Amino acid sequence: MKILVTGGAGFIGSAVVRLAIMRGHTVINVDVLTYAACLENVASVSENPLYKLEKVDIRDGEELDRIFVKYAPDLVMHLAAESHVDRSIDAPADFIETNITGTFNVLEAARKYWDATGKPKAFRFHHISTDEVFGSLPSNKSIQFTENTAYDPRSPYAASKASADHLVRAWHETYGLPVVITNCSNNYGPFHFPEKLIPVVILNALADKPLPIYGDGANVRDWLFVEDHANALLLVLEKGQVGRSYNIGGENELSNLELVNKICEILDRIRPRSEGLYAELITFVMDRPGHDARYAIDPSRMRLELNWRPSVTIEEGLELTVRWYLDNEAWWRPLLNREGVGERLGALKK
């Protein structure tokens, strides 16, 4: 099959690209290569004849039309997005333009192509979204996000992704475009851009710098290993029911403080500090505005309909991730010089 992937040089997108090519699919990677993208993420497949790269901005509808005509994809996986909540607080316009207008452009290019080719039944438009569109949950662990949870986004990022989800549903209901939507919990793993919590903690610890935790560290997230997520995304693309949404969760709920302590324990064991323990570097900093208290996904639909469950526990995944960063300094070191990396963003400074 021929899959057009938007955002395929990003963290999740590159995991999808690598897995799809490993399974024998042709992949057209459409990525404008913004600050968070990295071609090293797909270096392992870049010389594969099944891989094609188009450096194109999804805000450019004419270029998207050209790509659909040139490559005639069987399937679309739309992952291109601005994704960092803190950056969305400081610069919301970028998120509106890419995540909403960009999604509209990809939908329209896909719809025109689908119409022009006789509306093939096998065509799918898979929109990859986030659990943040659902808002915040109480601490009661019996309550989780389901596919029927009402949308209640709290940040510019979450609102832009919620808007994109609604556009995708509208294009299905109004134009008949065959779509599937997935909403995932927090991803982590190799190639995670070093402005997100887990790589920040690992790299700060290695540099013997403070390990920043927002507020009191009680905010809870459900953690999903990125390669598990890529596997689930391809499964939904191939076997998901048209018009349906699927929540993909890691079944690993931890507070931010618990998560950071686990990373510290791993580092204490495999790369000890010269003096003291890594947990001594934990520093509580001013909280993010509107910081959601808890995210947790009920993945029952994925399990019951598609026979999928995450295969990597948080303990296994964190150890794999820590070891990957220890072994891949040549990947992450240059990224530390990119705009905003290492700075406190989203604090509403005046």
Image (cartoon, rainbow, N blue to C red):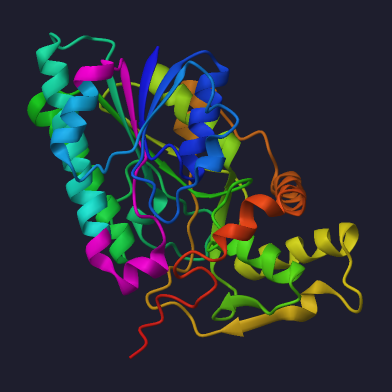
* Magenta stretch contains residue 145: no
Say left or right for 220 vs 182: right
Residue 127 percent coordinates (x, y) = 32, 35
Residue 76 percent coordinates (x, y) = 31, 26
Q: Quadrant of the N terminus?
A: top left
Say left or right for 273 vs 55: right
Name the residue rendered at 70%, 54% in the picture.
329
Tally of marks: 0
Q: Which residues are magenta?
A: 69-94
Taking depth in this image into account, of 50 and 87 the one nearest to the observer is 50
Rendered image quadrant of residue 95: bottom left
Say left or right for 178 vs 328: left
Taking depth in this image into account, of 93 and 216 the one nearest to the observer is 93
* Magenta stretch contains residue 93: yes
Rendered image quadrant of residue 175: top left
Name the residue rendered at 89%, 66% in the picture.
272
Taking depth in this image into account, of 293 and 116 the one nearest to the observer is 116
Q: Quadrant of the C terminus?
A: bottom left
Residue 94 percent coordinates (x, y) = 26, 61
Name the residue rendered at 24%, 42% in the picture.
58
Say left or right for 6 vs 223: left
Say whether residue 163 is visible: no
Indicate whether 18 appears above or below 131: above
Name the residue rendered at 57%, 19% in the picture.
22
Say whether residue 296 is visible: yes
